[in-house]
Amino acid sequence: MRHRQLRSWLTVLGVVIGIAAIVSLMTIGQGLEDAIIEQFSAMGAGKIRVVPEGLTGPPVGDTGFTEDDVDIVKDTIGVDYAGGLFLTSALVTYDDQNYITFLKAIDSSLAGDGHLDINAEIGEGKLFSSGETKVAIIGYGFANNIFEKEIRLRSSITINGVDFKVIGILEKVGNQEVDNVLYISKDDAKDLFGIGKKVSFIFAAVEEGKSLEEVADKIKTNLERSRGNDNFQVYTPDQLLSQLGSILGIVQFILAGIAAISLAVGGIGIMNTMYTSVLERTKEIGAMKAIGANQKHIMLIFLFESGLIGLVGGLIGAIFGTLFAFSVGIIASLLGYDYLSISILWSVILFALLFAFVIGMISGLWPAYKASKLNPVDALRYE
């Protein structure tokens, strides 16, 4: 094979691309799956959400829910606590810099008990207290990454022209949506935005030992009876994860198809290379048969060579695929998506190597069979 290195390397290329695609796809896919689960935990795992029907983005502004709907959810059997948030865009000014962001208005007594719609602990300062006005709670990212100057505890920020004092900064979670959050009390939002009893969405926590799905069904039934319509959706974390998992699965399936095509091309290349090798080594095959090699020996030699070509391609592809996956993780981290964690999946690499070896051997079956069937006399006379 040393004399046919260029042809062998070109043959290996198709296998390299296919295996690299498979390894990187499965590694990144596992990282995304872990990240989604982790981020759902940060965004309120274990909490039920009630949002408008057909929602494709954040539930912003007047979505048709009111505090009366929140009371219905609170009174549902199995609900530990519930709250309604009003989500709207706001202009925030700090140190002569302006920034437009989403703002969440929450009941101060609910937040004061530590019951936010997200799973984030207070890092500095405190949560809301009843009776406090013109105060805000911000996420770690909002405090450190939005403005050139860091927002510190008790700093003053301006929201739509009104000064607010920062009384609490949440711990870093690693999710931009959570880390860049901005909370004010619902009482302040009523003065600032005139929201009245409106809420954009409702969240509810379930009592210990109760089934999320069963309580969600009860909430849906009670709201339908109270509102007289079903133009809303009640989600549990598992339902949302299932939807995202389906989307991720479709993407992985498409990419796996592309990788399979590349492997098929690589397999055809191996077959062509091995067939050419049989023609070039016809006399060598005749000599081996003349000194006692049987059909099985000849076939095994060529099968091993084709499998070795596949294995080399698989090894190089696994290295490139792993490096690519880690590169994606590093780029994601630089862009602020710290939650995408990439790790080496040895089971995936071993599977890829075995798969590449098998692909190589399968591709070499026909050339190996042809080589084993050569007549030694004719082979020695071959020019």
Image (cartoon, helix red, strand yellow):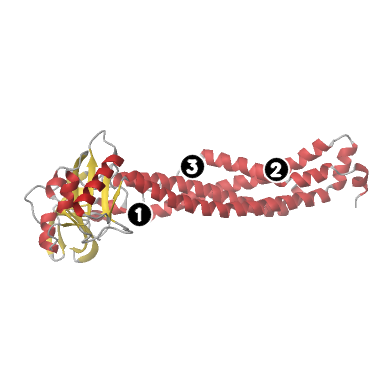
Bin the neighbour count of mark 1 within 10 Å (Cα to Cα): few under 14, some 14-19, many 20 and up. some
**Measured from the top left, where is residue 377 in percent x and y?**
93, 43
Q: Tell me the SS state at disc 2.
A: helix
**Measured from the top left, where is residue 27 in percent x and y?**
48, 46
Q: Is residue 215 visible?
A: yes
The three-letter code of the residue at mark 1 reads Gly
Q: Indicate whether 47 appears above or below 200.
A: above
Q: Is residue 170 visible?
A: no
Q: Which residue is mark 1?
A: 336
Q: Which residue is mark 3?
A: 344
The three-letter code of the residue at mark 3 reads Ile
**Measured from the top left, where is residue 246 in percent x and y?**
43, 50
Structural distance between the alpha carbons of marks 1 and 3: 22 Å
**Label of residue 371 in the image:** none
Q: Tell me the SS state at disc 3.
A: loop
Mark earlier in primary sequence (1, 2)? 1
Q: Which residue is mark 2?
A: 361
Left or right: where 39 falls relative to 254: left
The three-letter code of the residue at mark 2 reads Met
Bin the neighbour count of mark 3 within 10 Å (Cα to Cα): few under 14, some 14-19, many 20 and up. few
